[in-house]
Amino acid sequence: MSVRAGIVVTGTEVLTGRVADRNGPWVADRLLELGVELAHITICGDRPADIEAQLRFLAAEGVDLIVTTGGLGPTADDMTVEIVARFCGRELTLDAELEAKIAAILKHLMARFTGVDFDAVRAANRKQAMVPAGAHVLDPVGTAPGVVVPGSPTVLVLPGPPRELQAMWPAAIADEAFQQAVAGRTVYRQETVRMFGLAESGLAETLREAESLPGFAELEITTCLRRGEVEMVTRYEPHSAPAYARLMDLIRARHGEVVFSEDGSLIDELLARLLVGRRIATAESCTAGLLAARLTDQAGSSAYVAGAVVAYANEAKVDVLGVDRALIDSHGAVSQEVAEAMATGALRCFGADTAVAITGIAGPGGGTEAKPVGTVWFCVMLGDGTTVSRSVRLPGERADIRERSTTVAMHLLHRTLLGLG
């Protein structure tokens, strides 16, 4: 039987949606890498009864490990350690060595300020040095330490800020009590395949056919549609590798033309590799510069992104990108002709060898019977004269159309650079 874990994300700001939960998914991925089966992720506010209820629920589910995130600060609503101690039947005790470490961190942080009563600040943070008796302390990355409380289940208490939690993780999994809690884990493999240009229902039909393959029942498969791409994640024990190989043979036979990644790489990552040594520029209308932003984010800098023009007004297309006004008058701003003229202008403006232009109708009230909302034209143009233009009609609201247009543009660029057109 595999080792099972549960995650409790605490914080009223997370529960109410003011802050998006980044810790739950991150910890879930790390547990999976360790071969630990995740049973539940729960989110609750900063209320003692609710936090304890989540702990008791997970314990009743028979998990071997509970990971909590958040609630380790010095303020009154930070009470996770206190609740965990009560849940585990342990008293809170002051760890003098930990208190000294926290004081040293605070003294360094306060050095830049004047007129601060350090003793008052230290007193306010003393509660962070209160730990359950017998717990193992994880040194703070910020000012909040983590703790591992041995038991059945073992409880790992981590800070809420993702930067602190992630930096503390290596020490947490190296802890003796943590290692004992996950000692019976099974080593799993996880493979991610990404497809573009396939409806999720099409993949579902293939997976139904795959049920007759030997060993298929040993594969744990999840699929989802994300940014217009279909993602298939398969988890299995090493002995089931032949079953996964048979599944992939079927996937390639049915959907080989739309599979763009078999190793989990994102389209952003694949483009980053293809754009090395190139100089790209974008001309965007309706996507508000999202394409340039995604390309730049993946690069980590503007290494290959020469620049971007966001041109909504026709005057901007004419004055900045040099689009012939007669093209706009004859064909409309959302047309193949204007998309290609925008790409030409981007190449020229930035001295680039690669350009992508997007022009479309994303907002409500902007469409016509001939060109309804969601109509978008794309053009990828290379310095050698290669020009690939496409039009799609995308569903959804303004934000959906913008995001999906950006994804379509990236895939069109990817195929063009590969010579697939």
Image (cartoon, rainbow, N blue to C red):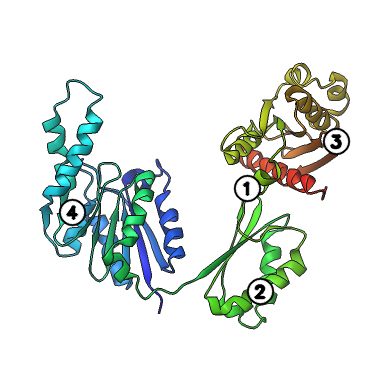
Q: Earlier in the sequence, mark 2 or mark 4?
A: 4
- The one nearer the camera, 262 or 85, is 262
Residue at 11 percent across and 59 percent down: it is: 91
Mark 4 to mark 3 CA distance (whole Å): 66 Å
Query: Where does label 2 land, which residue?
Result: 245
Query: Where does label 1 land, which residue?
Result: 269
Answer few, some or many: residues within 10 Å of disc 4's Cα (few below 14, many 20 plus, some between 14 and 19).
some
Query: Where does label 3 land, which residue?
Result: 384
80 lies left or right of 62 = left
Q: Relative to residue 29, is residue 61 depicted above or below?
A: below
136 lies left or right of 368 = left
- Residue type marked 3: Asp
Badge 2 marks a residue whose secondary structure is helix
Q: Earlier in the sequence, mark 3 or mark 1?
A: 1
Asked if residue 364 shows in the view, the reply is no
Viewer-side label of 2, 4 = 2
Residue 25 x %, y %: 45, 55
Q: Relative to residue 210, is residue 30 depicted above or below?
A: above
Residue at 77 percent across and 69 percent down: it is: 253
Mark 2 to mark 4 CA distance (whole Å): 49 Å
- The one nearer the camera, 12 or 78, is 78
Indicate the quadrant where residue 249 lies. Answer: bottom right
Q: Earlier in the sequence, mark 4 or mark 1?
A: 4
Answer few, some or many: residues within 10 Å of disc 2's Cα (few below 14, many 20 plus, some between 14 and 19).
few
Asked if residue 58 shows in the view, the reply is yes
